[in-house]
Image (tube, rainbow, N blue to C red):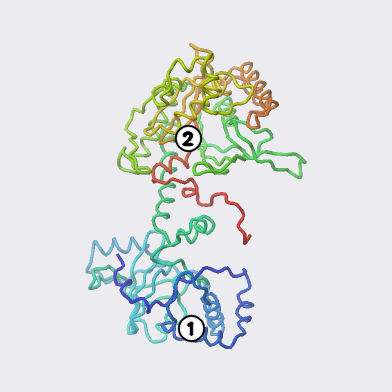
Amino acid sequence: MVRDALRAPHHERTTLPFALRNAPEGQVSRRVRTINSSALKTFVESAIMNPKELPPTTPHQESNEHEIRLAKVKKMQEEGINPWPSYKPVDVTTQQALEAFGKNPASTDEHTLAGRLLIKRDHGKTFFGIIQDRAGRIQIYIKKDDLGDAAFEHFKKFIDIGDIVWVRGSLFVTKMGETTVKVSQIDLLSKCLHPLPEKFHGLTDVEHRYRQRYLDLISNPENRDKFKKRSHVVQSIRQFLVDRDFLEVETPMLHPIPGGATARPFVTHHNAYNMDLFLRIAPELYLKRLVVGGFDRVFEINRNFRNEGVSTRHNPEFTMLEFYMAHGDYKDGMELTEGLISSAVKTHCGTYQVPFQGKVVDFTPPFKTLSVEDALVEIGKIARDQLAPSKIDALIKQHNIEVHSTAGYGFKLFALFERFVEPNIINPTFITNYPIEVSPLAKRDEKDPEIAARFELFISGMECANGFTELNDPFDQAERFKAQVAAREGGDAEAHHFDADYIKALEFALPPAVGVGIGIDRLVMLLTDTVSIKDVILFPTLKASKEE
């Protein structure tokens, strides 16, 4: 691809990979006026008039590239040229132009395109370049005889790598076999005041990729594609549910009482009402209120906020899908979850076998199902008799697993599961028969009241979905809220509050229902072979940098 634009030798680069530097916003003119050194002035003027004479440099060398571009802006303004003019209409994207030419290579029709100039190669009276728009990249060819002396000199003098340009031209195939736009007109649409990251390596510093995602998207096509894929996955999930008569809704992000999950909330304050509010940790209790109100099938693709630790699998702000369906139970939820995820995998990966971190995850339905206890035996390699209530404390102590002093047998069993089973699950596996102690919002199993009618789906060591038959007995729910309050008083900062308004809603009759939550970020990680959640979130939460 773009072979002609890459042919120029190293010393002919017109815009070099200088280190990034930040200019104070709105102070372009002031920055230009502060170039007082006569030597620097000479250098800048020479760079504008003769860009090929700039010496080669490395990406780590300090440079005056930013000042050069500021000086170009000043020069353009002095000549009555606006570096940020109004838009010009385009009639095709880069890919549409390539597709049209592929269907009719003999066509001499001209097209108008716009995009960011990524490469600019000077060959004397001609230039090769590459522009990038939302659809992809295309090579451009600029010839002095075609463009005219004045326009050619303007391009040579003022337009740099990183600038947004508009071009008009017809397509042809070069001697190197590259489909290329033969430019008859080129205009600057938006001046870029900083050099882009080194074009052959992209923006490789992880911290810079997160903090300056716009540069990451410009420089790394694979990351652009990853976020496009994320968007398409979310759209397909939405369509899957809409096709099954689910109604998409929106619920509050500011809650008077945090609920719907065991997590520490972020706290904020509403000045007009003089009251503290909590950022949503889950939309569950509001969605179930809607089911009480008669919306039998609802879903929300929502942002949740949890004031917890961070890791490659946890970000304080993340995206969840939650859906609720009246007149169903957790087994129906498993069926829907399996269908939704396997459909998304096949649609976006073209196969059920998906590579993830050196292993192949098989999403072929049906997914495996194990109880918590069976999983401890089969995957955790723990002898079943060691899980007996009389022996579990010794097992917990032997492996230095921390549990609250008030923890019952169910909490201890779940703690063992998290240690020995969860990290070792590769293929999609439903885990069922959870202790009721760790499922404060789930209905009890009809055959065993100590077991919740609940499932979780684990894939490649990650919890990806959680669902259960909803507890609709207001008296049972009130007692469980009381137990959660006691746990909070005992030191469990993540335990639920008592939500009297939700109990009141249950008293108006919640129909038998199932609810499911699916982590969108983790699902996208699996489908794009991405190890860190920060790489599938456009703007992940970060510590303040030293410069901030």
Q: How crowded is mark 2: few (under 14 residues within 10 Å), some or many (20 or more)?
A: many
Q: Where is residue 440 in the image (x, y as percent from the top left)?
A: 58, 23
- The residue at 46%/48% (across/down) is 536
Count the numbered circles shown: 2
178 and 432: which is toward the camera: 432
Residue drawn at x 43%, y 81% is 55
Residue 269 placement (x, y as % from top left)? 72, 43
Q: In the rendered image, is residue 224 in sight?
A: yes
For the residue pair 497 and 239, the one nearer the viewer reads as: 497
Sequence-wise, which precedes: disc 2 or disc 1? 1
Q: Mark 2 points at which residue?
A: 518
- Residue 106 is left or right of residue 398, and the answer is left
Quadrant for the C terminus, please.
Answer: bottom right
- Does residue 48 appear left or right of residue 22 in this picture? left
Residue drawn at the location 41% of the way across and 24% of the way down: 381
**Which quadrant holds residue 493?**
top right
Q: Is residue 511 visible?
A: no
Q: Quadrant of the N terminus?
A: bottom left
**Structural distance between the alpha carbons of marks 2 and 1:** 55 Å
Q: Does 537 appear above or below 136? A: above
State the residue at coordinates (51%, 34%): 322
- Dot 1: element: helix
Amino acid type of disc 1? Answer: Ile
* The furthest residue to the top: 447
Helix, strand or loop for disc 2: strand
* Residue type at the position of mark 2: Ile
Residue 48, label in figure: 1
Q: Crowdedness of circle 1 by 10 Å Cα count: few (<14), some, many (20+)? A: many
Residue 14: x, y in percent?
Answer: 42, 78
Q: Which of 489 and 24 is in front in this view?
A: 489
